C-alpha cells in the first residue's frame, strides 16, 4: 500500500481493509504488517539477469547493482540467480549464502540471444513450492528472440504461481539482439502478480532501482482469509480496497483455487 509519493503506508488495521473474491466480501482472519523480528516472513527470490550479447557494454554495472541487491537480504531469506541468454543457467539451489550468489553474478558473461519467456517460466517453476513470500525479479534489455514458449504461456504460469514479479526493462543503447523491448511482457506479469516495472535509461540508475525493489519486498502487509467456496481449480479474482484516500494498493489479480491431491 503506497501513498501518492510512492511511500509505504504504515499503521493500517483490519478495519481499513476490505477483501473481495469474485466480488464477494471475505472475512479477513489474519492481518499484519510484515516487518523484521521474531515474526519475520522468510523471502525467496529468483533474480533473473539478462546476459545476452547486447549486454556486453553494461554487464559490469549490472553485476555491481545485482550484488548490492542480494546483500540487502536477511538471514532468513534465500536466493537463486538465473542467467538469461539463449540457455538457462541457475546458481544450483536456493541458498542464504550471499558470497556464493556474488561469485555466480561476477562469473556471468554476455553472449547469445534472449530466451526471456523460457527463463521466466523456469524461474517460476523453481520458486513455485518455496515457503514464505516469493518474488521473481527480472532484468532484461530487450525482447525475447529464441524461446520455445510464447508470452501467453508465461503469463498463465505466473497466474498459477503465487510469486510477485518485478521487472526492470532496461532501455540502454542496444535493445536486444532482435530489437524491441521486454517492457510489455514485464508490465503484464507485474500487473497480474502485484509487482512493479521500472524502466531506467542509464546503467548508473540500476543500483537505485534494485534498492527500491528490495525496500518494497521488505514493506508489505500479510492478510489471509478462508474462501467459502470449495477448491475447484477455477480462477478466483481478488480485489483489496483500503479505506484511506489517495493510496495505491498492489495485489495479485487472483489465484487458482487448486484442489489438493488425496494422499494414498
Image (cartoon, grey):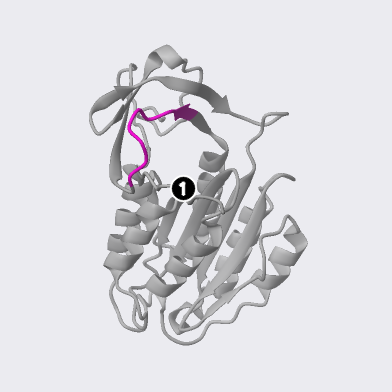
Q: Is 236 contained in the magenta span?
A: no
Could you tell me which residue is drawn at 57 percent across and 38 percent down? 218
Magenta residues, start to end = 223-232
In this view, the residue farthest toward the left is 23
Could you tell me which residue is drawn at 47 percent across and 50 percent down? 163
- Expressed as whole percent of the image width and height from the top left, the position of residue 80 reads 62, 62
In this view, the residue farthest toward the bottom is 112
Could you tell me which residue is drawn at 67 percent across and 29 percent down? 39
| Residue 262 or residue 159, whichever sits in front | 262
- Give the quadrant of residue 65: bottom right
- Give the quadrant of residue 105: bottom right
Q: Is residue 61 visible?
A: no
- Expressed as whole percent of the image width and height from the top left, the position of residue 190 reads 36, 51
Judged left or right of residue 30, residue 28 is: left
Judged left or right of residue 222, residue 66 is: right
Up/down of 131 relative to 15, above or below:
below
Mark 1 crowdedness (10 Å alpha carbons): few <14, some 14-19, many ≥20: few
Q: What residue is disc 1 on?
A: 260
Judged left or right of residue 146, residue 41 is: right
Q: Main secondary structure of the magenta part?
A: loop
Up/down of 217 relative to 248, above or below:
below
- Expressed as whole percent of the image width and height from the top left, the position of residue 189 reads 34, 55
Which quarter of the rendering shows the C terminus?
bottom right
Amino acid at each position: 500500500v503506497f501513498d501518492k509519493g510512492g511511500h509505504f503506508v504504515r499503521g493500517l488495521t483490519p478495519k481499513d481493509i476490505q477483501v473481495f473474491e469474485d466480488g464477494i466480501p471475505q472475512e479477513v482472519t489474519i492481518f499484519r504488517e510484515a516487518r523484521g523480528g521474531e515474526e519475520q516472513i522468510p523471502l525467496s527470490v529468483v533474480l533473473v539477469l539478462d546476459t545476452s550479447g547486447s549486454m556486453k557494454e553494461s554487464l559490469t554495472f549490472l553485476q555491481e547493482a545485482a550484488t548490492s541487491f542480494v546483500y540487502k537480504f536477511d538471514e532468513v531469506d534465500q536466493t537463486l540467480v538465473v542467467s538469461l541468454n539463449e540457455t538457462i543457467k541457475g546458481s544450483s539451489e536456493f541458498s542464504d549464502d550471499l558470497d556464493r550468489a556474488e561469485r555466480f553474478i561476477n562469473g556471468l558473461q554476455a553472449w547469445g540471444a534472449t530466451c526471456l519467456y523460457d527463463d521466466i517460466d523456469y524461474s517460476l517453476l523453481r520458486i513455485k513450492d518455496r515457503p514464505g513470500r516469493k518474488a521473481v525479479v527480472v532484468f532484461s534489455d530487450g525482447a525475447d528472440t529464441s524461446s520455445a514458449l510464447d508470452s501467453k504461456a508465461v503469463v498463465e504460469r505466473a497466474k498459477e504461481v503465487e510469486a510477485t514479479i518485478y521487472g526492470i526493462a532496461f532501455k540502454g543503447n542496444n535493445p536486444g539482439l532482435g530489437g524491441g523491448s521486454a517492457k510489455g511482457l514485464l508490465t503484464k506479469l507485474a500487473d497480474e502478480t502485484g509487482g512493479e516495472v521500472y524502466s531506467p535509461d542509464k546503467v548508473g540508475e540500476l543500483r537505485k532501482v534494485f534498492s527500491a525493489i528490495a525496500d518494497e519486498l521488505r514493506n508489505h502487509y500479510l492478510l489471509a482469509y478462508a474462501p467459502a467456496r470449495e477448491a475447484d481449480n477455477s480462477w478466483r479474482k481478488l480485489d483489496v480496497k483500503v479505506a484511506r484516500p489517495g493510496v495505491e494498493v498492489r495485489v495479485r489479480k487472483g489465484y487458482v483455487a487448486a484442489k489438493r491431491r488425496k494422499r494414498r
